[in-house]
Amino acid sequence: MLLNLGRKRWLACVATLLAGLTLSEGMVFAQGNGASGSRRPGEKNQSGQKAQPEGELKPGFDPVFSGRQALPGAKGVAAQPGAGAKKVGPAAGAAGRIGGQGGVILPPGGGVVAGQPDDDLYPVPPQAVVDKAVKAQRSVRKGLLAKPGVIGVGTCLEEDGTVVVKVMLNGIDKPQLPKVVNGVKVISEVIGEFRPMQTMLPPAGPARQRRLPRPVPIGVSAFPFDPDICASGTLGCRLRGRNGFFYALSNNHVFGLENEATPGTTITQPSAGDDNCPLLLVNENALGTVAGFVTLTFDEEDPNLVDAAAIFTEPTLTGVSTLPDGYGTPRSTTVKAFLGQRVQKYGRTTGYRVGVVTGIDMAVGPVGYDAGDAYFVETIEVTGTPSTLSLGAPGDSGSLVVDMNRNPVGLLFAGGGFPIVRTLCNDIDNVMRAMRFTLGDPTLVIDDSTPTIPPGKVGNSSPLVPVSPLLPIVP
């Protein structure tokens, strides 16, 4: 039996290596062919903002570390680096990179060719039109949110490119709404309810939901070990700081257990919900320990900016790229969301999906967490393309959302609606500012380096030995 299993794995590895070589020869990677295109520093993008030089550790203007003592909504709980943390030196880059894929060699960027959503739908509107709609929306938002049945208000984009004030409804109450505000059309949409995208469903079995060789890719199953909870979430990305520590990012309701996780709590890959819960091999599956989270509030008068948490990890445990069927390695330079922006994500449940930003500056709530109803501001709405495929589903919470040039845009945390699901994301700049404050590291950035995999790690004996990420790996 052992011989047969070894032979099957060997054959599968050879097949995977050959497929990977064929794929890499014919690929045009998203790095130079995304919707945003490659731009020189200082050149404006579609949102009218200047692109920043890529790969800088030093973040741009940050109100948290530029005179302000606290970020609104960034009530943080952080562990000290000594509490379960392991300090690691800076990762060394390598040409012909190995992108954290358990030995599968990928070209720089890695991942699949980024598909384009249907360009006939949701065209990018003129900025002056968007600014007018934002101003109109803000002038009536407080009054609209006070109406029974209203669970969200935002500046949104329709398929034909019309910018509107959208009011989201629970479908039970029928509030009276204006048809026009300051010359901007007002529409309503029945959502039902918003829920965080954490899942209690049994595992379906694709590679991203199973145990993978270390360092594990991003966008795969990960969750804290708690004998009383059997659930699944997504490891969003790896973070790095100049203090020599490495972290992994996800939601508070994933890594932080809705404010209930204590510093030092063990995070496993795969999630307990993907590993038959009671039989979870904690030590063998450990990925890191909780470093800190931005405290969630459950008060309409004190809305949240983000749902975010991070764990201590290291490059030998957590990689920086998705599995080969994802978008590859996210860049460290973030971009602001804008209406009509094309985005992509890779997550535990739905894997690789593309979508378009159809809502900005949104105030939403209640979002039904187990601990209570939470409310959020400065939220981003993404509609999947095609609309029959939502950007995310339960279990995708914590997924990093990037544009078609792999620049981070948001952190997926919730969704709602039927039959078209609207996915909600936190603005990634808000997430990073809050996590810098919470972890006490002003240099914290999304890690886009691709270190060579050290030999002798679990599931991989050498950095050049191909190990199929499509096979379940057991200790």
Image (tube, rainbow, N blue to C red):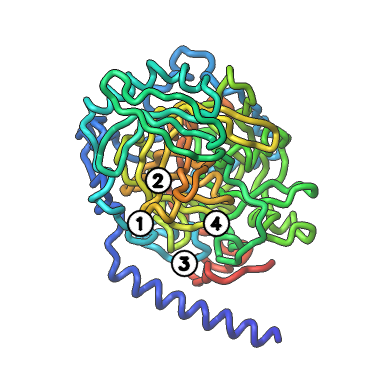
Q: CA distance from mark 4 to mark 1?
A: 25 Å
The numbered disc on residue 217 is none
- Residue at 34% of width from left, 26% of height from top? 179
Q: Helix, strand or loop at disc 2?
A: strand
Q: Earlier in the sequence, mark 4 or mark 2?
A: 4
**Mark number, residue 349:** 4
Q: Identify the disc placed on residue 383.
A: 2
Q: Quadrant of residue 299?
A: top right
Q: Earlier in the sequence, mark 2 or mark 1?
A: 1
**CB atoms of marks 4 and 1 within 8 Å:** no
In this view, the residue in front, 25 or 390, is 390
In the rendered image, residue 211, in percent from the top left (x then y), is placed at: 63, 62
Q: Are marks 1 and 3 in contact (CB under 8 Å)?
A: no
Q: Secondary structure at mark 1?
A: loop
* Quadrant of res 282: bottom right
Residue shown at the point (58%, 27%) measured from the top left: 438
> Could you tell me how far apart the alpha carbons at marks 2 and 1 are, in whole angstroms?
29 Å
Q: Which residue is mark 1?
A: 108
Q: Closer to the camera, 304 or 266?
A: 304
Q: Nearer the viewer, mark 2 or mark 1?
A: 2
In which quadrant of the rendered image does the C terminus lie?
bottom right
Are the two marked residues, 3 and 4, in contact with CB atoms closer than 8 angstroms?
no
Q: Amino acid at mark 4?
A: Thr
Query: For mark 1, does the 10 Å Cα neighbourhood hold few (<14), some (14 to 19), or many (20 or more) residues?
Result: some
Q: To which residue does mark 3 refer?
A: 104
Sequence-wise, the earlier of marks 4 and 1 is 1
Amino acid type assigned to the residue bearing label 2 in the image: Thr
CA separation, marks 4 and 2? 17 Å
Mark 4 surroundings: few (<14), some (14-19) or many (≥20) residues within 10 A: many
